[in-house]
Image (cartoon, rainbow, N blue to C red):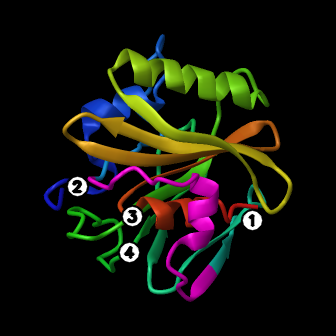
Amino acid sequence: MATRTGLQLLAPMIGLLLWGCAEAETDWPQIPAAPTPTPTMTLQAAASAAPQLPLQTYRDEAYGFTFDYPAGWMLEPVSLGDRSPTAYQLTSWVHAPGMASAVPPGGSIMSIGVQHWDPKGDLDAFVAQRKSAWRASGLTISDEEEVILANGSRALAGVVTEPGEGQGYFLFTLVGEDYLFATGDGEVLLLASVAQSLR
């Protein structure tokens, strides 16, 4: 997978992962896939068992959410279009700003941001729509679970697998009436740990 590029990994899979079934938007957040084995324990338990690395904390002032990520990872704002007014890309390697092209072997990449979608404030409907699109495309969802974040917010998380291609991690929750997403490619348990630090 080292030859795939940044947030455009597995473009056909990504389009169906996060775009609406009825309307293909080009500005939806993307879930790349990685050749990581499916965890055997729940993601929530696994996230706490992920490698314990020194952490940095980032706070988005516009929407008020905070997350922790490994020190040494690169964080930069990215533009995902009008439906995602706030988005960040995290990479486990350092690169020139805006130039996270090829994911190096063993590397991890994650997007965290806000998604506008109607109806507002209905996490179950938001996730059901995504899951319907994934299944229609032949993807499977594994290790799906409900997670309670540190701030008491409910989140839905899991792993999406495309046969022969690999896996992508996802977590969706609410921020106000909008949707907060964390999607990634790489070391699934470490990505789960970052995503589940959202608060």
Which mark, by number, is residue 5? 2
Disc 4 packing (10 Å; few <14; some 14–19; many ≥20):
many
Looking at the rendering, which quadrant does residue 150 occupy? bottom right
* Label 1 with label 3: CB-CB less than 8 Å: no
Specify the amino acid type for callout 2. Answer: Thr
Tell me which residue sits at (34%, 51%) in the image. 7
Q: State which tag comes first along the sequence, 3 or 2.
A: 2
The residue tagged 3 is 187
Q: Closer to us: mark 2 or mark 1?
A: 2
Q: 199 or 64: which is nearer to us?
A: 199
Which mark, by number, is residue 122? none
The residue tagged 4 is 92
Q: Closer to us: mark 1 or mark 3?
A: 3
The reply, left or right, for residue 107 in relation to residue 196 is left
Q: Closer to us: mark 3 or mark 2?
A: 3
User: What are the residue bounds of the magenta stretch?
Assistant: 35-56
